[in-house]
Amino acid sequence: MSAPIQIGVDPGGSPITIDIVELLATRLLVQGNSGSGKSHLLRRILEESAAIVQQVVIDPEGDFVTLADLFGHIVVDGAAYSAAELTRLAARIREHRASVVLALDGLEIEAQMRCAALFLSALFDAPREQWFPALVVVDEAQMFAPAAAGEVSDEARRLSLTAMTNLMCRGRKRGLAGIVATQRLAKLAKNVAAEASNFLMGRTFLDIDMARAADLLGMERRQAEQIRDLARGQFLGLGPAISRRPVAVRIGPVRTGARVMAHELAPPPTAAPGQLHALLHADLHLDDGPACASPPPPSAPEAETLIERIEAVPLVAAEDIEEGQAVAVPQGEIDAAVDGILFEMAVEEGCTFQPPAKLFQDFSVRCRMQRITAGQVGMAQFRRRFAMALAGVTDASASPWREILRVAGSLSDDLLAPFLVIAHAAHTGAPCPDDHELARIYGTNSLGRIRRLLEHYERSGLIVVRTDFSGRRSVAIPELGLSTEPLEA
């Protein structure tokens, strides 16, 4: 399965894409001097993948908060919350798969490092059942994973570097795919940069950075000079999610922008020096308050309020995301689309042998590819609905499935699918499924385990297994008055 998004075009005008599914497993490193277009590139990736995968942005300059206007990201002001509140917020973000921007522009550098470390660690420490796929974008990563000690305390540097290392080295198994952007590779800790398998290298001028970029791209040292000649918004890309050979790409347009934009040149005022002197020094002795008082910024919402907003992320379609308009879709249509995805997964070979967390990640990606946010389908509900899809349950509210599911209410989710398959055969008058079919549904190669499972169903009073003198097995569900046909031995 793949989920390509177009980030731009090559010199010949052909589209260049990034496969988000591959990126989740292989991570991305972006380098470029200030003004090379790194933030534009990150914004393009975030905008194009907003409907496909959850996103968490660590934003030290507050440049990406405008994603909230068009794509519904929740902005978390790192300066407004305590350490305990940030930890709770991060836990809820993983649980409810909300896309967020952690804005740190209101903090000093050391406080930014501590805040980012706390936030990333809480994402990393989520329980296994919440290891959902998410892109974690860290802009100006050299601030959070510095290669050398700076003016910040050793404790802050250690905390931040540990969190960044965990993200890049161990985050993949937890569904966290790091995208780190830096102005200089030489300033970024090597154990963080080395874990990326995909690279997008923009303009840089220092020989040491050009040499490292050329090495990562598999280019000869004499070819490194072309990195210096890249224009703004041009990058060289390489990696399994991009291209197997270095490819030049001009990044495409974006629909959102930073809050602060660079202004064009403006000539200084033409007032006489004497007039300017008088304007600058007028009433300096007064101490009645600031000469130009700007309105106070709006206060950040309380932690409880923000948590409620995260929990309230609805299960909605986003078909008109290009126009930035939310689309209200009837719940019935959304459930039908989700059921279609589940049935599509259920017929794939070997699907039942995959861990539930991996199946749920696959389900989440497929939902977002169809522009559906699976915000109301938790892990437990997914396992139950997937078991129903394996059994061919098309309408859980219809008779007799409503009664069958009521009878199966005492079963845990991992034991549900084989029982539903047996119940489906009993309802349709089909022969009892054999041990090999039940083993495939259950996700095991052990036939003995299936026999023990049937014994468990029988001890629980759910079924009665009958074997006639010719060795043919049939299964009855006494509470429903249903029975399968005998299975030929």
Image (cartoon, rainbow, N blue to C red):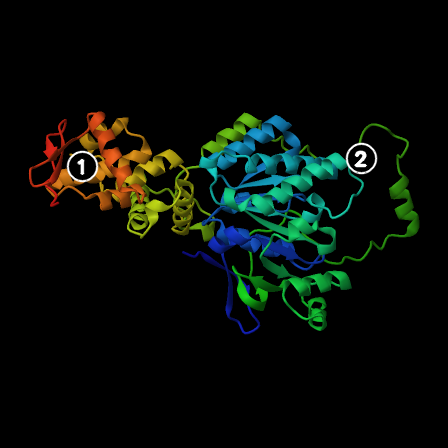
Labels 2, 1: front one: 1
Choose top left, top right, bottom left or bottom right for residue 3: bottom left
Residue 322 x/y as whole percent: 46, 53
Q: 4 or 408, which lies in front?
A: 408
Can you tell which mark lies on residue 17?
none
Relative to 70, residue 299 above or below: above
Q: Quadrant of the N terminus?
A: bottom left
Residue found 54% across the figure and 26% down from its top: 304
> Within 10 angstroms of label 1, few (less than 14), some, or many (20 or more) residues?
many
Residue 255 x/y as whole percent: 54, 54
Identity, as a three-letter code, of the amino acid under mark 2: Ala
Can you tell which mark lies on residue 291?
2
- Asked whether the viewer can see residue 342, the reply is yes
Q: How many labels does the image show?
A: 2
- Asked whether the viewer can see residue 106, the reply is no
Choose top left, top right, bottom left or bottom right for residue 75: top right
Is residue 360 toward the left or the right of residue 225 in the image?
A: left
Q: Is mark 2 on a helix, strand or loop?
A: loop
Residue found 59% across the figure and 63% down from its top: 237
Q: Name the residue under label 1.
A: 423
